[in-house]
């Protein structure tokens, strides 16, 4: 093994930067609030981060392929509405909707189908993914509101199990988020389909010229994003016990921020699942800490917006520098 020092890649440097920022932010909030470092609160931070992590895993695949999915939050909303429609029975006496275990396969199948529809629409219409998923965002959310009559629906039964189950004192959704992140990393780094997905993001034109079936690869990415959106929705509903019109609202911007902040390039060809997980945890830690110190709730979106602008600007500058030095080369880091 060579003893020479090797400089960090941009993704590696960004991951270590996230670790340092997460540590500093945690120390800062711990000094401002006695409750932040409490073990129960730290467990709560992990549980709060789980839906964002899961949604961001699917978004990482889409963005790595040089796509974007603005409809992921709307998919979460519509998938849960369809699940209640197919496996829920309104109980007027209890003012709640009883559910069966069928809510899980229905929600998951709905997420996969809606994500696949995004890819098919993008391929068929030949429009940018931004325009296509902006349209499906409105479509899916409108359908979800129509099915639920834009009402607040209390739920009970099996639909609550996943979001509230615990293992060794830690919420099961946390383990699910970690497993999905690992699966996403293995998919991108160890499977031919994953490497082809990165190749498509790195240079779509070259991918077509070399015979890669880009349409099918995009279906895989968007279907995964839809699946992750539905699972995130199941966790959110399980935790709060209601399906409300705001379910999934704003999720797309949170997960896109986490993905780009974590080191996945908006210009495709480079992905970092470990960075995605760290960034999701950082954003949740900031939200949790600001709540504990009594910060203005309206400041949350300001902070997210500033972080997103910084991440996108840094990514754009990096892409410009790479384009001046050499062709885009697909890159993956854990």
Image (cartoon, grey):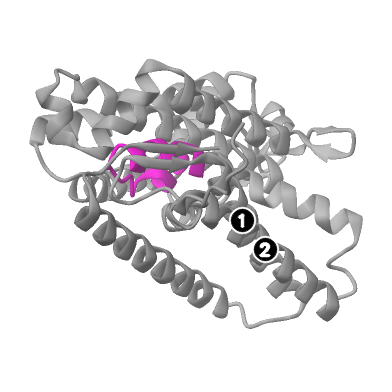
Magenta-colored span: 56-77
- Residue nearer the viewer, 232 or 264: 264
Residue 90 can be seen in this image: yes
Q: What kind of element bears circle 2?
A: helix
Q: Compared with residue 59, is residue 282 higher up or lower down, i.e. above or below?
A: below
Pointer 1 local density, CA inside 10 Å: few below 14, some 14–19, many at least 20: some
Q: Is residue 260 above or below residue 165?
A: below
Relative height, residue 258 to residue 27 (above, below): above
Q: Is residue 248 visible?
A: no
Comparing 100 with 32, the one in front is 32
Q: Quadrant of residue 315?
A: bottom left
Q: Is 127 one of the magenta-colored residues?
A: no
**For residue 139, which quarter of the picture?**
top left
Mark 2 sits on what residue? 20
Checking the image for residue 225, the label placed there is none
In depth, the one of 279 and 328 nearer the eye is 328
Residue placed under numbered mark 1 in the picture = 16
Residue 299: where, in percent of width, then height? 56, 80
**Residue displayed at 66% across by 34% down:** 178
- Check residue 65 for magenta coloring: yes
């Amino acid at each position: 093994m060579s003893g020479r020092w090797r400089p960090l890649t941009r993704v590696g440097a960004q991951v270590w930067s996230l670790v340092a920022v997460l540590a500093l932010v945690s120390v800062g909030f711990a000094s401002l609030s006695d409750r932040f470092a409490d073990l129960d609160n730290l467990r709560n931070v992990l549980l709060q981060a789980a839906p964002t992590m899961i949604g961001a895993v699917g978004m990482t695949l889409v963005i790595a392929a040089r796509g974007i999915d603005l409809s992921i939050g709307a998919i979460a909303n519509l998938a849960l509405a369809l699940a209640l429609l197919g496996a829920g029975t309104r109980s007027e006496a209890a003012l709640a909707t009883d559910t069966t275990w069928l809510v899980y396969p229905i929600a998951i199948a709905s997420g996969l189908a809606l994500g696949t529809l995004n890819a098919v629409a993008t391929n068929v219409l030949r429009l940018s993914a931004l325009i296509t998923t902006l349209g499906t965002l409105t479509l899916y959310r409108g359908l979800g509101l129509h099915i639920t009559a834009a009402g607040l629906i209390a739920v009970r039964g099996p639909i609550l199990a996943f979001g509230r189950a615990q293992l060794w004192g830690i919420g099961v959704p946390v383990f699910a988020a970690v497993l999905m992140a690992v699966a996403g990393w293995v998919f991108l780094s160890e499977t031919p389909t994953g490497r082809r997905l990165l190749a498509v993001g790195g240079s779509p034109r070259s991918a077509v010229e070399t015979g890669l079936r880009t349409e099918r690869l995009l279906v895989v990415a968007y279907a995964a994003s839809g699946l992750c959106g539905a699972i995130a929705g199941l966790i959110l509903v399980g935790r709060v016990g209601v399906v409300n019109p705001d379910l999934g609202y704003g999720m797309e911007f949170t997960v896109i921020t986490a993905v780009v902040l974590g080191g996945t390039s908006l210009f495709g060809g480079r992905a970092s699942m470990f960075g995605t997980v760290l960034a999701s945890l950082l954003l949740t830690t900031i939200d949790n800490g600001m709540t504990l110190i009594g910060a203005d709730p309206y400041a949350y979106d300001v902070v997210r917006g500033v972080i997103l602008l910084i991440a996108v600007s840094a990514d754009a500058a990096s892409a410009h520098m790479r384009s001046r030095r050499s062709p885009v080369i697909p890159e993956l880091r854990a």
